[in-house]
Image: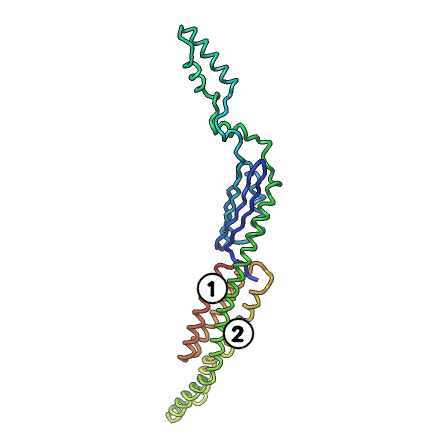
Amino acid sequence: MLFSMTGFGQARRETERYAATAELRSLNSKTLDLTLRLPRFLQAHELDIRQQITKALLRGKVNFNLDFSRPAGPAAAGPVLNQAALKAAYHELQRTAQSLGLPVGEATLLAALRLPGVVPTPAEAAQAENIPADEPTWAELQPLLTEALAAMQQFRQDEGATLQQEILGYVATIRQQLAAVEQHDPQRILHVRQRLNAHLAELTQHEQFNATRFEQEVLYYIEKLDIAEEKVRLAAHLDYFELATRQPDEAVGKKLGFLAQEIGREINTIGSKANDATVQHLVVGMKEELEKVKEQLNNIL
């Protein structure tokens, strides 16, 4: 079973006290690259959050954002007058005006309204409502992360299933091309035998012909052209590759990457040893399909 490194998961909770949204996004990465955005009151729990995400997601460039907000309180409807502060400011201005011999009237009231604290600003009102004891605990918000992780895992599994079918299609094409090589190989060997017989007939007539040395060189040449072992190993690697994609392990991307390297090594050896135009053409096709496999393996966990 394959899992994609690309994923998305979200969970939301709304109460009378707050609204919170946990959101996870993941892209491809060779290791786990985790970035967190948390409300200030959860900063102390950053290590616990990192450990939970790391244990669940293993690899990928992961961004976790926990958005927290409170519902709009009475301050949202408009400024709230602080009557006690207004009375104190007005009386103080009144006494000051009388001591200076200035008239007291509507201008004094307007001046009192403009003094700090009489009509709280939105920021001051929000700060006044932000009571630390009323903050939710991490134990209350932690299920949001668990739910977002579950959604992320389901997303990765669904994407992985799509990638698995695509990758196995490329592997099946490599099998078909390997079968074509197998089918063509007897004809290739016949051509090699004919060339050797022609050279043998020519060399045996040479007066410095050394039969023993010639036999050794012929054996070396035949062994060098023999691709039977490479064909067997390539078929075995393809079998193991398909088996690995169906294993229950969640993270098999690196294993598949190593197998793809071995598959490529056998394909290259077949191409270099065959010394045949038809086989070379089939080898090029296998290389093309293998490159498609490697490209998709970059997305696999």
Quadrant of the rendered structure where residue 114 is? Answer: top left
Q: Residues within 10 Å of mark 2 (few under 14, many from 20)?
A: some
Q: Residue at x 48, y 26 (%)?
A: 79
Amino acid under label 2? Ala
Q: Residue at x 43, y 76 (%)?
A: 282
Amino acid under label 1? Lys
Q: Residue at x 44, y 9 (%)?
A: 96
**Is the residue 210 above or below the residue 40 in the image?**
below
SS type, badge 2: helix
Q: Residue at x 42, y 14 (%)?
A: 106
Q: Residues within 10 Å of mark 1 (few under 14, many from 20)?
A: some
Between discs 2 and 1, the one toward the N terminus: 2
Q: Which mark is residue 294?
A: 1
- For label 2, the residue is 235
Q: Which quadrant, please, contains the N terminus?
A: bottom right
**x, y percentage for residue 69?**
53, 37
**How did the renderer colour the structure?**
rainbow
Quadrant of the rendered structure where residue 98 is? Answer: top left
